[in-house]
Amino acid sequence: METKREAMRETIRPKRLGHLVLAVRDIQASVKFYTEILGLQVSDWISDQMVFLRAGTDHHDLALSQIPKDSPDIDDLPRYSRPGMEHFSYLVEDRAEMDRAAEFLQEKGVEIVRGIGKHGPGENLFLVFKDPDGNNVEIYCEMTQITPETKYEPKVWERNIDSFDQYHFKHFVVPPPQAVIAAKTNKK
């Protein structure tokens, strides 16, 4: 008879997001955005072509790599109609910090895409905004924590407004995009 260990499929067991590397059009503009808007700190550079940034004690959780200035694809910005990263996120302390961040982003002229909202899966609050290369950056708080002591059963959520935003856009600081409204509420 198999032992429990033998029966368990061996897998990689990640604990949290480690880091993300983004290719950027203007590394100096991106460093300025991530340090002056999101509040990250520079850990190291590789020449003027790559920079390592951190929010906490890890050496880096975000790295930026300069796209060659003569790249034919330098202005091919992220979009929802192709594979690739949709967003990445950083945890903030609480709703008050999220409200403060929304005001700060608006004062700085940073494009807010969606939020403040509350997702169904995870129950976390979210606010999504654009970096200089058009990537979606999310800050979040109050996410459900699942620990060995927590009884938790996975659920399949319907793809609708309740799974996307339990507040039904009432706390959004900008109007929700029409495509989001149509996709989540079946309204055109």
Image: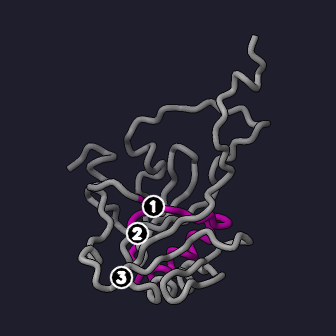
Q: Residue sitting at 57 percent across and 48 percent down?
A: 123
Position of 17 relative to 104 (above/below): above
- Do tag 2 and tag 1 residues touch (Cβ < 8 Å)? yes
Q: Residues within 10 Å of mark 3 (few under 14, many from 20)?
A: some
Locate residue 43 relative to residue 170 in the image: left or right. right
Q: Position of residue 96 (x, y in %)?
A: 63, 69
Q: Residues within 10 Å of mark 2 (few under 14, many from 20)?
A: some
Find disc 2 in the rendering and name its residue: 135
Residue 121: say if magenta: no
For this rendering, which residue is in front, 125 or 168?
Answer: 125
Give the mark nearer the N terminus: 2 vs 1: 1
Which quadrant of the view contains residue 90? bottom right
For this rendering, which residue is in front, 154 or 100?
Answer: 154
In front: mark 2 or mark 3?
3
For this rendering, which residue is in front, 3 or 62?
Answer: 3
- Do tag 3 and tag 1 residues touch (Cβ < 8 Å)? no
Find disc 3 in the rendering and name its residue: 68
Q: Secondary structure at mark 3?
A: loop
Q: Amino acid at mark 2?
A: Asn
- CA gap, disc 2 to disc 3? 18 Å
For this rendering, which residue is in front, 93 or 60?
Answer: 60
Residue 86: say if magenta: yes
Find disc 1 in the rendering and name its residue: 87
Q: Residues within 10 Å of mark 1 (few under 14, many from 20)?
A: few
Q: Residue sitting at 69 percent across and 42 percent down?
A: 146
Q: Which residues are magenta?
A: 85-114
Q: Amino acid at mark 3?
A: Pro
Q: Residue sitting at 42 percent across and 66 percent down?
A: 136
Q: Secondary structure at mark 2?
A: loop
